[in-house]
Amino acid sequence: MRALVTGGCGFIGSHVVRGLLADGWEVTNLDKLTYAANPANLAEAEGHPRYRFVQGDICDLALVRELMDGADLVLNFAAETHVDRSLLEPGVFVRTDVEGVVTLLEAARARPGTALVHMSTDEVFGSIPAPGEAAEDAPFAPSSPYAASKAAAELMVRAYAETYGMAVTVLRCCNVYGPNQHVEKFIPLFTMRALAGEPMPLYGDGMQEREWLYAGDFVEALRVVLRELPAEPGVHAVHIGSGERVRNRETAELICELLERPRELITPVADRPGHDRRYALDSSRLRARGWRPRVPFREGLAATVAWYRDHGAAWAQTASGEFARYFERQYGERLARR
Ligand SMILES: NC(=O)c1ccc[n+]([C@@H]2O[C@H](COP(=O)([O-])OP(=O)(O)OC[C@H]3O[C@@H](n4cnc5c(N)ncnc54)[C@H](O)[C@@H]3O)[C@@H](O)[C@H]2O)c1
């Protein structure tokens, strides 16, 4: 079986590519190699007889059509993914996260034999007041340009499914964490700052709740989904949530504890605009299909923090100049004003 994976050099995509290769798939990885990619995430796949890397853009219809030829499955993980950056430069989010998805849909509609699975996010629902959980049919209420671009992509998926009778599976996942994630994201950023003994900039009161899923548990969930991909026309949404909801301050404190660093490094800074307070998915449907997350948050966090302690310097070096400029733009003034 052949899979076209997009965004395989990013965080989740790299775990997925490794999982598919282990399961015997032939994998083509289409990745533009933006600042968020790290080819080292897939170093061990290089040279694998069933693995091929193609550098390119999911917005390139001719290329996407060519790569879809002969593919049984397309898994879309290519995206601009950092909420904070979407506040600074929303245009690139519309391009990749909306136009890119339309390009994939356009190529896939001519190939009824190719199953399309698109990765979306719990952020399309906006903030979910406690003790609520968003079910698959909850209304969209995105708060950030990132979340709005993901919601817009989902609406295009729906339009294609209705118009052309396509069957598309949409995965809406909670926050994923683990090795291979860009150092700009919350857990790697706070781990790297703690390791360096530098202030860890915590937005607002730090009481925002996030639902955390270990990357390996995401791959297991995907395996369950792939066992039975619905062929009936329509959008088949699947919620993948761990149910483990933790306040950001508590996560920051756990990182300090794991690295034996003082909690005083945690530095409250001005919140980001439109910051959602709480995400919570109802993933009972997927659980009814036999999936359960296996890695508790404390355990997964310890493994992740240990991974960044051992590999973080190489990641930070990959990201160095661009990341330093981004960090200054996003946090420089906030940290100076605290
Ligand atoms: N990380 C999370 O916690 C999380 C949670 C829910 C949903 N998601 C979704 O999962 C998907 C993957 O997220 P991630 O955290 O692995 O992202 P990431 O930022 O780590 O990786 C994205 C990858 O996509 C590639 N890419 C970007 N634009 C491209 C383009 N136009 N053409 C081809 N490749 C391109 C990048 O080079 C990079 O390798 C995204 O759709 C994201 O919205 C992520």
Image (spheres, rainbow, N blue to C red):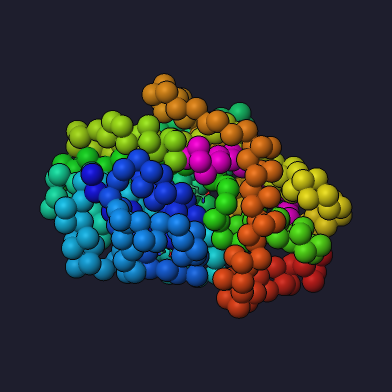
Can residue 258 be spotted in the picture?
A: yes
Start-end of magenta stretch: 201-218
Q: Could you tell me which quadrant the N terminus lies in?
A: top left
Q: Quadrant of residue 328?
A: bottom right
Q: Quadrant of residue 194?
A: bottom right
Can residue 97 be spotted in the picture?
A: no
* 154 relative to 328 in the view: left or right: left
Instruction: Give the image location of residue 242, x and y in percent.
Output: 55, 33
Front in this rendered view, residue 91 or 254: 254
Instruction: Give the image location of residue 30, x and y in percent.
Output: 33, 62
Instruction: Give the image location of residue 32, x and y in percent.
Output: 38, 68
Against 106, is 124 above or below? above
Q: Measuring 56% from the left and 41% from the top, which residue is drawn there?
A: 214
The verdict on residue 212 being magenta is yes
Instruction: Give the image location of residue 267, x and y in percent.
Output: 80, 58
Q: Measuring 50% from the left and 27% from the top, which residue is drawn there?
A: 292
Quarter of the render that holds ligand 1: bottom left
* 124 relative to 329 in the view: left or right: left
The verdict on residue 75 being magenta is no
Q: Measuring 57% from the left and 71% from the top, which residue is drawn there?
A: 318
How many marks can you see?
0
Q: Measuring 70% from the left and 68% from the top, which residue is drawn there?
A: 331
* 210 relative to 268 in the view: left or right: left
